[in-house]
Amino acid sequence: MTAGAVVVGGASGIGAEVVALYRAEGTPVVVWDIQDPCDIHCDVADPADVERATEETVARWDVPRWVTITAGVGHAGLLSDADPEEWDRVMRVNARGPWLCMRSLARVMTHADQPGSIVVTSSVSAHLVDRNMGVYCASKAALNMLVKVAAAEWGARSIRVNAVAPGVTMTPMLGGIPEGSAWLTGVVERTALERLGHPVDIAHAIRAVHDLEWVTGQIVECDGGLSLYSPIDAYGEGIRARRGRGS
């Protein structure tokens, strides 16, 4: 079996949907994760684990052409209340981990003189201010710049690097918040397409970006229009107020 694709964090959520799309089209795919079902157990926060996973992938399946990195953790809380250990944990998984994976797999692509595409999962939180998600926002902002610099650095090797940035998506990272909750209902009201995102929505965007051979260093937002919302949108507030009055 030749490893056409590697999905880091492919056991659940968005990553699992990317894996399903690959398998449906017959593309060989290797799943890295810290939980089952996976082909290779890998903790992206551990440099040695990442190098071992890369070596095992190449030895058993060959050099991948498409790499998707969806592994990540959430975090909620004020910057003034966060512990330094929380900051380190979120940055280690959301920014350092993708860098370790990107670097390791780009090296084997380069050694094999093989073109490749790397797509990581960022977030609209990389540029939208949320006072209750400061640490998470910072980690995704760091990831966005990592993508841009890597694209510039590795472009001469024919390795493209991009990100897809979801909005609020119904994945395990939400912690089981029911769709009808007040917070998620508010998100729907602020989303142009008037629904929440689902993992398969993001997976289709990731697959599409992999196929765009003249695109690199880009952050493609896939949020149903959530980031179009303005908190000072008087027209939108008026519409919501009238809906509340039943008019």
Image (cartoon, rainbow, N blue to C red):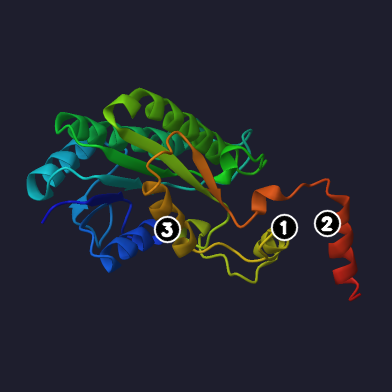
The CA span between labels 2 and 3 is 30 Å
Q: Which residue is mark 3?
A: 203
- What SS does tag 2 mark? helix
Q: Quadrant of residue 22?
A: bottom left
Residue 35 in view here: yes
Instruction: Say left or right for 244 vs 204.
Output: right
Q: Which residue is mark 1?
A: 190
Q: Are marks 2 and 3 in contact (CB under 8 Å)?
A: no
The CA span between labels 2 and 1 is 9 Å
Type of residue at label 3? Ala
Q: Are marks 2 and 1 in contact (CB under 8 Å)?
A: yes
- What SS does tag 3 mark? helix
Instruction: Say left or right for 146 vs 34.
Output: right
Residue lying at 60% horizontally and 69% vertically, measured from the top left: 179
Q: Is residue 211 above or below residue 25?
A: above
Type of residue at label 2? Gly
**Image quarter (top left, top right, bottom left or bottom right) of the N terminus:** bottom left
